[in-house]
């Protein structure tokens, strides 16, 4: 995977998280203050952009549900117990979960 | 705090409001929209607008004398009241004025005016003329005080700016910047049906947040709001019909996006847009006329559009610029950095007309107009009388309010 740093900088800037450049000299408070309905949508879209082909091929391990759960959430999540989605969709669902924002 | 709301509720309870089929005008006027639904749109005129050629004192001797080439004559100015007129390219503002939807505060500024763009703009954004403290902005500080009531709601949206404007910076809140409405749409791959199915799964997985105060409850509530809002914005965008066409200029298109977000009920209380190019040091006549036309036509269309959607009562638009320009034109058919200038207010709630005298053209401060109205008085009025937010901490003190609202 070769991340596109320009795209990353643009998105983090929109989210008020420009690296080394906090919006105020006080720095970031973080926590809930990162989250609004708008920033969550931008996070969702960033997850989609990451998964939308710029990443090369997605790994499709044998037990992909367990593999990605372990990788991204490190816990079981209700609603995904029997998910059989193809990898990109599955990972997007995981990355847009409210639980994922807490990890 | 909410005395007006409480008062109206009491009125309703006693049956006073429901006396006749048509409310008495006094009550009709009092029945302003609930403060929670009120919206402030700020339009920044970046570069220092030549206020003197925007609201023109065409009969002043000194105006004609100090503006021999750039002065706008009595015949050309669009008449407002007395010997004041608008720049000839501001037909849209003239119509708003005649319709009772435009208020003009004259001579707005601050003590010891600073003629640097950056410093003066920072002063307008931070409301701190005395000290260079750029930690947060005047609206950002106001969000801090309504924070408990926001709960994941977007307090403000800056549309089309590269960076978050300092006025919206809060030490406690992250305000997103939005390049275009695309940022508010959920971007998914696949066919329409696949996208709808995926969106439904996301919604389902996010649901189930209780009104509790855990971080997860908060995230669930915000995530479902986000998905619902983006669906609504997509719906609004797909068949949005402005009540009046917007001009094909930058400000017009940005304001159209703002109108769409308001129509989709995004829930933000403040919207911020900017128009640049006002630093007219040379050959200003053509470019300034273009800017006056863009500002006036865009805001007239915005107001008409909101009116058509039944929203013009809920939205108040205010313009500001970091400074006006010097009274005397320079040798390059332009004007240099000055001081006090006018602010415009648009909306059904506005007390239409001219607020305050035109600053004197004979009693000048080193060749600049003297302000008689502190910009923090205007901010205090917008916060206290319009948004119903605490003003004192936001503007750093007690400032007399103006009668800007009807």
Image: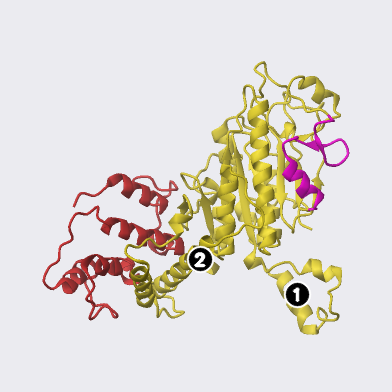
Chain colours: A red, B yellow
Res B275 quadrant in image: top right
Residue A8, above or below B9:
above
Disc 2 designates what residue? B235
Kindly identify the residue that appears in the image at 40 percent across and 75 percent down. Answer: B217
Residue A90, above or below B319:
below
Q: Mark 2 or mark 1: which comes first in sequence?
A: 1
Name the subunit of mark 1. B
Considering every residue shown, the one lying at the far top of the view is B331
Q: Which residues are magenta?
A: B74-100
Q: In this rendering, which labeled residue sits more in front, label 2 or label 1?
A: 2
Q: Position of residue B173 (x, y in %)?
A: 47, 58
Q: Is residue B357 left or right of residue B260?
A: right
Number of other residues with Cα within 10 Å of mark 2, as a class: few under 14, some 14 to 19, many 20 or more: few
Q: Label 1 near label 2: C-beta < 8 Å?
A: no
Q: Position of residue B224 (x, y in %)?
A: 43, 72
Kindly identify the residue that appears in the image at 22 percent across and 76 percent down. Answer: A84
Disc 1 designates what residue? B8
Residue B68, above or below B205:
above
Along the viewing direction, whichever of A10 and B254 lies nearer the viewer: B254
Name the subunit of mark 2. B
Alpha carbon separation for disc pair 2 and 1: 35 Å
């Amino acid at each position: 995977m070769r991340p596109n740093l320009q795209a990353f900088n643009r998105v983090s800037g929109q989210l008020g998280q420009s690296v080394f450049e906090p919006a105020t000299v006080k720095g970031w408070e973080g926590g809930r203050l990162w989250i609004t309905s708008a920033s969550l949508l931008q996070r969702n879209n960033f997850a989609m952009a990451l998964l939308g082909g710029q990443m090369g091929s997605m790994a499709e391990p044998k037990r992909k549900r367990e593999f990605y759960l372990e990788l991204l959430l490190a816990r079981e999540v209700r609603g995904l117990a029997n998910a059989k989605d193809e990898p990109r969709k599955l990972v997007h669902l995981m990355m847009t979960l409210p639980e994922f924002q807490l990890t | 705090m909410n005395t007006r709301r409480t008062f109206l509720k009491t009125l309703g309870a006693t049956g006073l409001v429901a006396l006749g089929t048509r409310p008495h005008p006094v009550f009709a006027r009092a029945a302003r929209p609930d403060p929670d639904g009120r919206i402030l749109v700020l339009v920044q005129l970046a570069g220092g607008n030549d206020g003197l050629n925007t609201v023109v004192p065409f009969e002043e001797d000194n105006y004609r004398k100090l503006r021999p080439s750039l002065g706008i004559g009595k015949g050309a100015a669009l008449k407002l009241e007395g010997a004041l007129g608008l720049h000839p390219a501001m037909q849209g503002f003239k119509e708003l004025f005649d319709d009772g939807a435009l208020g003009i505060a004259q001579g707005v500024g601050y003590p010891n005016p600073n003629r640097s763009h950056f410093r003066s703009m920072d002063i307008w954004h931070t409301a701190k003329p005395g000290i260079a403290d750029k930690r947060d902005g005047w609206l950002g500080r106001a969000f801090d005080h309504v924070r408990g009531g926001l709960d994941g709601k977007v307090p403000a949206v800056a549309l089309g700016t590269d960076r978050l404007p300092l006025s919206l910076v809060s030490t406690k809140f992250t305000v997103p910047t939005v390049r275009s409405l695309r940022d508010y749409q959920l971007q998914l791959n696949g066919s329409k049906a696949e996208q709808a199915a995926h969106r439904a799964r996301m919604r389902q997985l996010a649901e189930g947040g209780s009104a509790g105060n855990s971080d997860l409850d908060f995230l669930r509530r915000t995530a479902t709001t986000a998905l619902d809002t983006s669906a609504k914005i997509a719906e609004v965008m797909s068949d949005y019909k402005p009540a009046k066409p917007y001009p094909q200029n930058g400000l017009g298109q940005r304001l159209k996006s703002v109108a769409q977000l308001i129509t989709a009920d995004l829930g933000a209380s403040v919207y911020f847009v900017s128009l640049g190019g006002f630093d007219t040091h040379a050959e200003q006549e053509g470019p300034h006329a273009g800017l006056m036309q863009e500002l006036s036509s865009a805001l007239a269309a915005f107001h008409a559009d909101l009116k058509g959607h039944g929203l013009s009562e809920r939205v108040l638009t205010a313009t500001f610029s970091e400074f006006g320009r010097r009274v005397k034109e320079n040798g390059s058919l332009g004007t240099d950095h000055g001081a006090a200038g006018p602010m415009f207010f648009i909306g059904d709630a506005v007390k239409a007309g001219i607020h305050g005298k035109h600053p004197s053209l004979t009693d000048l401060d080193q060749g600049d107009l003297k302000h008689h109205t502190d910009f923090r008085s205007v901010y205090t009025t917008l916060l206290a009388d319009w948004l119903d937010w605490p003003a004192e901490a936001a503007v750093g003190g007690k400032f007399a309010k103006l009668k800007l609202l009807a």
